[in-house]
Image (tube, grey):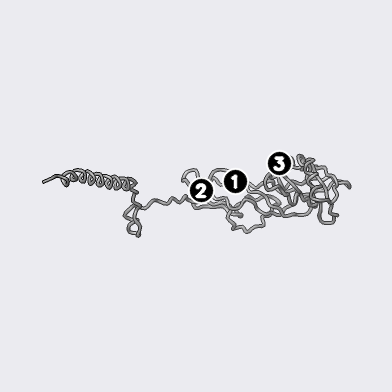
Amino acid sequence: MKEVILETEVRETGSKSSLEAFRKQGKIPGTFYGKGVKPSNIAVNSRDFMTIIAENGANVIISLKLKDGKKPVIVKELQRNILTQAPIHVDFQAISLKEKIEVLVPIHIEGIADGVKNAGGVMEHIVREVRIAALPTNIPQKISLDVSALTIGKGLTIADLPKLEGVEYLQDPSTLVVNVVTVKVEEEKPAAEAAAAGTEPAQPEVISKGKKDKEGEEGAAAAGGAGAAKAAPAAGTKK
């Protein structure tokens, strides 16, 4: 196993402003603790730390370089800024390379399910991480699961994950990891069915009705006015 070394520096317990000062300098405030060791406040270079995680995964075993020598650790918790996702604090837990530890390992899906590719189904990825127990040197970066043979209505469980030497799966073997289902399409009901169900199709609004009525009223008024105009001279004619 390749040794991954990360430099540290001691930091004093400080205020929120002092922690922000560390971050502005490109450092991540952190804590080092573990069985049989004295907890201490430290800081690590942000770029170096994130490079290690990107290249080796979240469960990488790091040789943390402290004042009294190097200690093997794992990243127990990494806090990030909610908006920027930049790391703001990291907890390192001291471990023994000869004792098993429990960690979460991501499940990586490989292939395209037959039911998705050839039958128009959809694959549900239900469990994305699995808890395992293993020696630190046996912890895989990821666990690959081939789904290419899955047809509609079929799935894979924790029990179907590949057997890896020195790795024990701690979750219920019957837990569903992935599943291929059909796509439900709701068809529009015909007018006859809608009427039978007590509903009728909406009728289109006649937007010109008011205009025609108004024009009819105006026409009637105009006709009445014309008739009155013709009748007026007859009323004034001398006998």
* Residue 102, horizontal then vertical, whole percent: 72, 55
Q: Can residue 87 be seen in this view?
A: yes
Q: Quadrant of the N terminus?
A: top right
From the viewer's perspective, tell me whether residue 195 is left or right of residue 123: left
Residue 112 horizontal/vertical position (percent): 54, 43
Count residues near mark 3 (Cα–Cα under 10 Å), then give few for <14, some for 14-19, many for 20+.
few
Give the residue at mark 1. 109
Nearest-to-viewer mark from 3 and 1 = 3
Left or right placement of residue 36 versus residue 165 in this view: right
**Which residue is more in the foreground, 4 or 9?**
9
Residues 193 and 220: in front is 220
Q: Find numbered disc 3 in the image and state the secondary structure of the residue it sits on.
A: helix
- The circle drawn on residue 122 is 2
Relative depth, front residue between 199 and 113:
199
Mark 3 in CB contact with mark 1 (< 8 angstroms):
no
Q: Position of residue 176 (x, y in %)?
A: 58, 55
